[in-house]
Amino acid sequence: MAGSRWVSLDRVRVAGACALLGASLGAALVPLPAAAQGQSAQPGTDGALTPPPVVDPKKVETTPVAPAGRTFAPQEITLSPVPVLTLAGSATWEEAFEKLVASVKQTDAELQRLGLARSGDTFIVYTSSDDLSFEYEIQVPFSGTTTRKPGEGMKLGGSHAGKVLKFTHAGSFADMDNTYEQIANYLDEKNVEQNDMYIEQYRTDIVTGSPDALTIDILVPVP
Protein backbone atom coordinates (compact mmCIF):
# COMPACT_ATOMS: atom_id res chain seq x y z
CA MET A 1 0.00 0.00 0.00
CA ALA A 2 2.78 2.42 0.83
CA GLY A 3 4.40 1.82 -2.55
CA SER A 4 1.12 2.52 -4.37
CA ARG A 5 0.68 5.78 -2.51
CA TRP A 6 4.17 6.94 -3.44
CA VAL A 7 3.58 6.09 -7.10
CA SER A 8 0.36 8.09 -7.08
CA LEU A 9 2.07 11.04 -5.44
CA ASP A 10 4.85 11.03 -8.05
CA ARG A 11 2.26 11.07 -10.80
CA VAL A 12 0.58 14.11 -9.28
CA ARG A 13 3.92 15.91 -9.05
CA VAL A 14 4.81 15.16 -12.69
CA ALA A 15 1.37 16.22 -13.91
CA GLY A 16 1.63 19.48 -11.99
CA ALA A 17 5.05 20.25 -13.41
CA CYS A 18 3.83 19.63 -16.98
CA ALA A 19 0.84 21.91 -16.42
CA LEU A 20 3.05 24.74 -15.19
CA LEU A 21 5.45 24.31 -18.11
CA GLY A 22 2.59 24.35 -20.62
CA ALA A 23 1.11 27.48 -19.04
CA SER A 24 4.41 29.38 -19.24
CA LEU A 25 5.00 28.39 -22.90
CA GLY A 26 1.43 28.95 -24.02
CA ALA A 27 1.84 32.68 -24.50
CA ALA A 28 4.86 32.18 -26.79
CA LEU A 29 3.13 29.70 -29.11
CA VAL A 30 1.82 31.07 -32.42
CA PRO A 31 -0.91 29.14 -34.27
CA LEU A 32 0.49 27.43 -37.37
CA PRO A 33 -1.10 27.80 -40.81
CA ALA A 34 -3.56 25.12 -41.80
CA ALA A 35 -1.09 23.49 -44.19
CA ALA A 36 1.54 23.28 -41.45
CA GLN A 37 -0.97 21.53 -39.18
CA GLY A 38 -1.41 18.69 -41.61
CA GLN A 39 -4.62 20.10 -43.16
CA SER A 40 -4.70 20.96 -46.88
CA ALA A 41 -6.06 24.36 -47.90
CA GLN A 42 -8.58 24.27 -50.79
CA PRO A 43 -8.71 26.83 -53.66
CA GLY A 44 -11.86 28.98 -53.75
CA THR A 45 -13.91 30.01 -56.80
CA ASP A 46 -11.76 33.14 -57.21
CA GLY A 47 -8.52 31.14 -56.98
CA ALA A 48 -7.79 32.26 -53.39
CA LEU A 49 -7.04 29.69 -50.76
CA THR A 50 -9.77 29.03 -48.21
CA PRO A 51 -9.39 27.05 -44.97
CA PRO A 52 -10.85 23.52 -44.85
CA PRO A 53 -14.24 23.03 -43.20
CA VAL A 54 -14.22 22.54 -39.44
CA VAL A 55 -15.41 19.09 -38.38
CA ASP A 56 -16.99 18.82 -34.93
CA PRO A 57 -15.55 15.98 -32.82
CA LYS A 58 -17.87 13.08 -32.19
CA LYS A 59 -19.77 13.23 -28.94
CA VAL A 60 -18.63 10.71 -26.34
CA GLU A 61 -21.41 9.23 -24.27
CA THR A 62 -20.48 8.79 -20.63
CA THR A 63 -22.16 6.84 -17.86
CA PRO A 64 -22.03 8.21 -14.30
CA VAL A 65 -20.04 5.93 -12.03
CA ALA A 66 -20.90 5.65 -8.36
CA PRO A 67 -18.05 6.51 -5.95
CA ALA A 68 -15.95 3.57 -4.88
CA GLY A 69 -16.60 1.97 -1.51
CA ARG A 70 -19.71 0.99 0.38
CA THR A 71 -21.50 1.86 3.54
CA PHE A 72 -20.42 -0.46 6.33
CA ALA A 73 -23.32 -0.01 8.73
CA PRO A 74 -24.68 -2.75 11.02
CA GLN A 75 -28.25 -3.56 11.86
CA GLU A 76 -29.20 -3.39 15.53
CA ILE A 77 -31.34 -6.34 16.56
CA THR A 78 -32.38 -8.13 19.74
CA LEU A 79 -31.83 -11.88 19.91
CA SER A 80 -34.23 -14.22 21.65
CA PRO A 81 -32.79 -17.43 23.13
CA VAL A 82 -33.38 -20.70 21.33
CA PRO A 83 -32.55 -24.22 22.60
CA VAL A 84 -29.10 -25.33 21.41
CA LEU A 85 -26.70 -28.20 21.82
CA THR A 86 -23.30 -26.75 22.68
CA LEU A 87 -19.82 -28.18 22.14
CA ALA A 88 -16.76 -26.28 23.39
CA GLY A 89 -13.39 -26.50 21.69
CA SER A 90 -10.15 -24.77 20.79
CA ALA A 91 -8.03 -24.52 17.64
CA THR A 92 -5.15 -22.70 16.05
CA TRP A 93 -5.96 -20.16 13.35
CA GLU A 94 -4.19 -22.31 10.74
CA GLU A 95 -6.59 -25.19 11.31
CA ALA A 96 -9.62 -23.02 12.08
CA PHE A 97 -12.03 -23.96 9.29
CA GLU A 98 -11.31 -27.69 9.35
CA LYS A 99 -11.62 -27.82 13.14
CA LEU A 100 -14.91 -25.90 13.15
CA VAL A 101 -16.40 -28.14 10.46
CA ALA A 102 -15.37 -31.25 12.42
CA SER A 103 -16.97 -29.86 15.59
CA VAL A 104 -20.24 -29.07 13.80
CA LYS A 105 -20.33 -32.60 12.35
CA GLN A 106 -19.77 -34.00 15.85
CA THR A 107 -22.61 -31.89 17.24
CA ASP A 108 -24.97 -32.90 14.42
CA ALA A 109 -24.22 -36.57 15.08
CA GLU A 110 -24.96 -36.10 18.78
CA LEU A 111 -28.31 -34.46 17.98
CA GLN A 112 -29.28 -37.55 16.00
CA ARG A 113 -28.22 -39.82 18.85
CA LEU A 114 -30.34 -37.80 21.26
CA GLY A 115 -33.35 -38.00 18.93
CA LEU A 116 -33.40 -34.23 18.38
CA ALA A 117 -33.88 -32.39 15.08
CA ARG A 118 -31.66 -29.58 13.94
CA SER A 119 -33.84 -26.47 13.51
CA GLY A 120 -31.75 -23.46 12.55
CA ASP A 121 -28.45 -21.91 11.52
CA THR A 122 -25.32 -22.92 13.38
CA PHE A 123 -23.83 -20.40 15.83
CA ILE A 124 -20.10 -20.25 16.51
CA VAL A 125 -19.27 -18.23 19.61
CA TYR A 126 -15.69 -17.02 19.97
CA THR A 127 -15.04 -16.78 23.69
CA SER A 128 -11.33 -15.85 23.64
CA SER A 129 -8.45 -15.58 21.19
CA ASP A 130 -4.86 -14.52 20.66
CA ASP A 131 -2.48 -14.37 17.69
CA LEU A 132 -2.05 -18.14 17.55
CA SER A 133 -5.28 -19.77 18.67
CA PHE A 134 -8.84 -19.30 19.87
CA GLU A 135 -11.52 -20.92 22.00
CA TYR A 136 -15.05 -21.38 20.76
CA GLU A 137 -18.45 -22.92 21.30
CA ILE A 138 -20.46 -24.62 18.58
CA GLN A 139 -24.18 -24.03 19.19
CA VAL A 140 -26.64 -25.92 17.03
CA PRO A 141 -30.37 -25.07 17.45
CA PHE A 142 -32.72 -28.02 17.80
CA SER A 143 -36.33 -28.94 18.29
CA GLY A 144 -37.80 -31.81 20.27
CA THR A 145 -37.24 -33.29 23.72
CA THR A 146 -35.02 -36.02 25.07
CA THR A 147 -34.39 -37.86 28.29
CA ARG A 148 -30.87 -38.79 27.31
CA LYS A 149 -27.82 -36.94 28.50
CA PRO A 150 -25.47 -35.32 25.97
CA GLY A 151 -22.06 -36.84 25.42
CA GLU A 152 -18.89 -35.70 27.12
CA GLY A 153 -18.04 -32.05 26.49
CA MET A 154 -21.56 -31.23 25.31
CA LYS A 155 -24.53 -29.64 27.02
CA LEU A 156 -28.09 -28.57 26.32
CA GLY A 157 -28.89 -24.94 26.91
CA GLY A 158 -29.96 -21.67 25.30
CA SER A 159 -28.33 -19.41 22.74
CA HIS A 160 -27.24 -15.82 23.43
CA ALA A 161 -30.01 -13.35 24.14
CA GLY A 162 -29.92 -9.58 24.07
CA LYS A 163 -29.03 -6.64 21.85
CA VAL A 164 -26.40 -7.13 19.15
CA LEU A 165 -25.01 -5.30 16.14
CA LYS A 166 -25.34 -7.50 13.06
CA PHE A 167 -22.71 -7.26 10.33
CA THR A 168 -22.70 -9.56 7.29
CA HIS A 169 -19.73 -11.21 5.62
CA ALA A 170 -20.21 -12.62 2.12
CA GLY A 171 -17.20 -14.35 0.64
CA SER A 172 -14.48 -16.74 1.66
CA PHE A 173 -13.58 -17.86 5.17
CA ALA A 174 -9.99 -16.74 4.52
CA ASP A 175 -11.13 -13.15 3.87
CA MET A 176 -12.99 -12.75 7.15
CA ASP A 177 -10.03 -10.93 8.71
CA ASN A 178 -10.82 -7.98 6.45
CA THR A 179 -14.43 -7.91 7.63
CA TYR A 180 -13.40 -8.10 11.28
CA GLU A 181 -10.96 -5.24 10.72
CA GLN A 182 -13.78 -3.10 9.34
CA ILE A 183 -15.95 -4.04 12.31
CA ALA A 184 -13.20 -3.02 14.74
CA ASN A 185 -12.76 0.30 12.93
CA TYR A 186 -16.50 0.92 13.03
CA LEU A 187 -16.75 0.16 16.76
CA ASP A 188 -13.81 2.46 17.49
CA GLU A 189 -15.22 5.27 15.36
CA LYS A 190 -18.64 5.04 17.01
CA ASN A 191 -17.18 4.51 20.51
CA VAL A 192 -19.23 1.35 20.93
CA GLU A 193 -18.59 -0.51 24.16
CA GLN A 194 -18.61 -4.30 23.89
CA ASN A 195 -16.89 -7.32 25.33
CA ASP A 196 -14.52 -9.60 23.46
CA MET A 197 -17.21 -12.10 22.48
CA TYR A 198 -18.22 -12.44 18.84
CA ILE A 199 -20.94 -14.69 17.46
CA GLU A 200 -21.03 -15.97 13.91
CA GLN A 201 -24.36 -17.21 12.53
CA TYR A 202 -23.76 -19.31 9.44
CA ARG A 203 -26.42 -18.61 6.81
CA THR A 204 -24.51 -20.98 4.56
CA ASP A 205 -24.16 -24.49 6.00
CA ILE A 206 -20.54 -24.66 7.14
CA VAL A 207 -20.47 -28.44 6.57
CA THR A 208 -21.86 -28.62 3.04
CA GLY A 209 -20.95 -25.14 1.82
CA SER A 210 -17.75 -24.08 0.10
CA PRO A 211 -15.22 -22.20 2.27
CA ASP A 212 -14.85 -19.78 -0.65
CA ALA A 213 -18.54 -18.81 -0.80
CA LEU A 214 -20.06 -18.26 2.62
CA THR A 215 -22.68 -15.90 3.98
CA ILE A 216 -22.17 -15.27 7.69
CA ASP A 217 -23.84 -12.82 10.05
CA ILE A 218 -21.34 -11.54 12.62
CA LEU A 219 -23.15 -10.59 15.83
CA VAL A 220 -21.49 -8.20 18.27
CA PRO A 221 -23.16 -8.12 21.71
CA VAL A 222 -23.56 -4.57 23.08
CA PRO A 223 -24.97 -3.19 26.35
Image: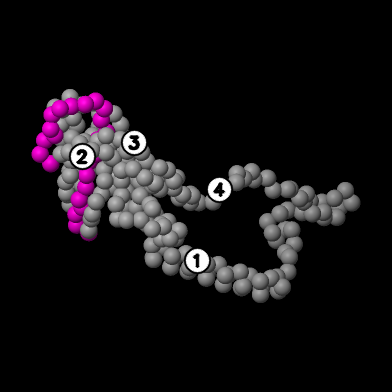
Mark nearer the N terminus (2 vs 3): 2
Q: Nearer the viewer, mark 4 or mark 2?
A: 2
Query: At x 55% / y 67%, what residue is drawn?
Result: 15
Is 178 covered by the magenta stretch?
no
Whole-angstrom CA distance, mark 4 to mark 1, is 24 Å
Marks 2 and 3 close (CB-CB < 8 Å): no
Which of marks 1 and 3 precedes in the sequence? 1
- Disc 3/disc 1 C-alpha distance (Å): 45 Å
**Which stretch appears magenta?**
131-153
Residue under label 2: 86
Residue drawn at x 29%, y 29% is 119
Amino acid type, mark 4:
Ala
As drawn, the label of residue 133 is none
| 135 in magenta | yes
Dot 2 lies on which element? strand
Q: Which residue is mark 4?
A: 66
Residue pointed to by mark 1: 11
Q: Nearer the viewer, mark 2 or mark 1?
A: 2
Q: Secondary structure at mark 3?
A: loop
Q: Label 1's element?
A: helix
Q: How many angstroms separate mark 2 from mark 3 (CA)? A: 18 Å
- Earlier sequence position, callout 2 versus callout 1: 1
- Secondary structure, mark 4, is loop
Location of residue 182 with respect to 79 vertically, above or below: below
Q: Position of residue 123 (x, y in %)?
A: 28, 40
Q: Position of residue 20 (x, y in %)?
A: 62, 73
Callout 3: few (<14), some (14-19), or many (20+) C-alpha neighbours within 10 Å?
A: some
Give the alpha-carbon distance from disc 2 to disc 1, as whole Å. Answer: 57 Å
